[in-house]
Image: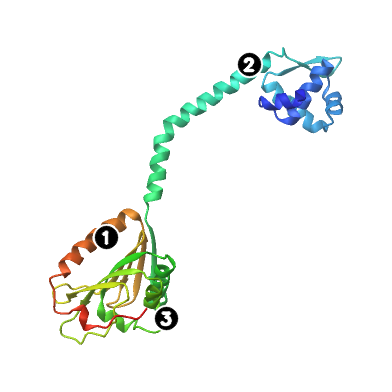
Amino acid sequence: MTLVNRLKQIGLAEKEAKIYVALLEMGEATPQQLSLKASLNRATTYVILDSLKKGNLVTSQNKRGKTYFIIENPLAVLDFLEKEKKEIEDRINVARTIMPELEMIERLTKERAKVKFLEGREGVILIQKDIAKSNPKNFDNIFNIGGLNYFPVYKDDHRHVYVRKHIKVRSIAVYDPKELIPKLPLLWHEERRYLPLNKFPFEADFTLYNNKAALVSVKDQLLGVLIENKSIVDGLKTLFELAWQGAEKYKEVRETDYPRAKK
């Protein structure tokens, strides 16, 4: 291994190592002589000599009206490395002091909720497509069955995608006891329970899947909100469990009233 490569191993750049070796071999030299010896242009040689001088690896002196550079004692290389070692240790100590703050910012960034607002029928369709695209193994939802006026069941709609992908679904349908309930076939892997609107005034669509929650208002206008945040969704899943258990005692409508969708 050449001396240039060994000097590179201790931290010198290749051109710095070339100038250092050239100067070591020449004893003393002007920048012009060094540029020829190291096969580097003069402007680069000046920059490198300035860098080596700041590192106390070379020094300069004036002779006969010219500036000559000479090597400091080669032991200066060890001093150079000791100085770099001290600077690295100082940076490590600073890094240790700010690490708690960096970790806190990283944690807050990861926990920050991603929220999207989507309006109109097109926006709600985007939410439905996101559910299908996310390939959840299961999802839970609460919906006002009157919202089917906005999204009636049709061939190959998002609900049929759930059937084809064998996604397990738990649904709570909120219905108006005073109105005729639309016929809504059960999905193949769906469990459904019902709540009366007069006791539970819920006029929205609320779906939980993976680490996301989709909320859609169907009362006055179609407005959707898509939230992606594990902590929030875990909390909403707990609320869904409470609603799911509470819906068990309402038997005004039974699953057997509806045929199950085909595979």
Q: Which quadrant: the N terminus?
A: top right
Image position of 46 (left or right of 139) = right
Please tell me whether mark 1 or mark 3 is closer to you in this view: 3
Give residue 19's position: percent from left, percent from top.
78, 25
- What amino acid type should be assigned to the residue bearing mark 3? Asp
Q: Toward which corner of the image does residue 70 lie, by quadrant?
A: top right
Please tell me whether mark 2 or mark 3 is closer to you in this view: 3
Picture disc at residue 156: 3
Q: Toward which corner of the image does residue 168 lie, by quadrant?
A: bottom left
Q: Is residue 29 above or below residue 163?
A: above
Picture disc at residue 236: 1
Seen from this angle, which residue lies furthest bottom? 180
Q: Toward which corner of the image does residue 262 lie, by quadrant?
A: bottom left
Picture disc at residue 79: 2
Residue at coordinates 77% horizontally, 28% vertically from top-left? 46
- What amino acid type should be assigned to the residue bearing mark 2? Asp
Q: Which quadrant: the C terminus?
A: bottom left
